[in-house]
Image (cartoon, rainbow, N blue to C red):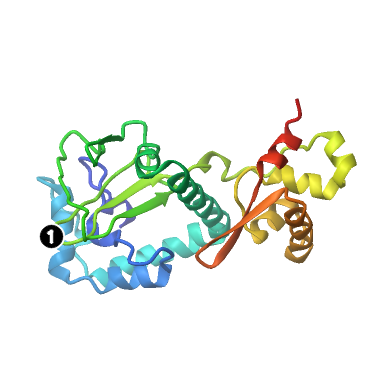
Amino acid sequence: MLDALISPEHGWLPDFVTPRPDTPLPRIDDEVRQVRDTAPDKAMADIRSVYGGHPVPAVLCQEPAVIAGTLERYWRLAIEPHWPRMRAVLEADMLYRARLLARDGAAAMLTELDHRARWVGGELQLYVGQTLAYDAAVAGRGFWLVPALFVPQTISPVGPDEPPTVVYRARGVGTLWETLPSRPPEALAELIGQSRANLLATLDGPMSTTELARQLGVTPSAASQQLRVLLRSGLLTRSRVGRVVLYARTELADLLMDPV
């Protein structure tokens, strides 16, 4: 069924299996419920839309609840065990975009999503495929930016009755499975201690206490204690993204990590 959901012509997915977010931090249970509650006629219309002239496999001619159950099982087996690490990468990207927006403005933040993105006369222009041509007015409808780990390029699924959405490849995907942090300079370890220097070396992008503790192989309480000291020393900043607090190195800490 999972193979069949991917259309043979373009590799697209039916819209109903990728519900648009209605909150900055959606829960997997809520998203699966949206798929399960899709009207059967709507689900089949979405499937036929991506299959074009190709015949629809029999495995997809089932109730949306059956398809939702398969997606949920896949999530539990393949994604959920690694979700804390994946979520840390996504949340770090969200924090980076927020800072870029505040510092350089919307045009700089949006065109940085993809090297083919253009900002012309107040319009964001994205290349999403040779056979697609969409125009969508954002004013009054909302505008969602969705970082993702498994998209090859920036895409923009747009429907006539839903807010414009841009799904883009999150920063830091290449570090997702890294296990060995960078080594701090010896002089820095002598100055602030080996454990705090290791923490700064590991924190090469915004991270939560839990993710830092996992990468360092220590308890969250031990990581939290070191974070508080570095925060008071001006070597870290702290920002909240939804329910998660992310820590990042300051410019001073970056200089200490890479002395001239």
**Quarter containing the N terminus:** bottom left
Q: Is residue 148 visible?
A: yes
Label 1 neighbourhood size at 10 Å, few (<14), some (14-19), many (20+)?
some
Query: Could you say which is closer to the camera, residue 231 or residue 145?
Result: 231
Residue sitting at 54 percent across and 39 percent down?
174
Give above or below for 126 relative to 38. above
Instruction: Provide residue 18's location: percent of width, then percent of height.
Output: 30, 58
Residue 80's spot in the image, x, y percent?
51, 62
Left or right of 84? Residue 183 is right
Most foreground residue, 94 or 100 = 100
The answer to which quarter of the image holds residue 160 is: bottom left
Where residue 38 sits, quadrant-wise, is: bottom left
- Dot 1: element: helix
Left or right placement of residue 44 versus residue 172 in this view:
left
The foreground one among 134 and 237 is 237
| Residue of label 1 | 45
Against 55, is 186 above or below? above
Give the image location of residue 243, x and y in percent.
Answer: 53, 68
Q: Is residue 210 above or below residue 53?
A: below
- Left or right, 106 with respect to 202, comes to left
Residue 59 seen in render: no
Q: Residue furthest left?
A: 53
Image quadrant in which the C terminus is located: top right
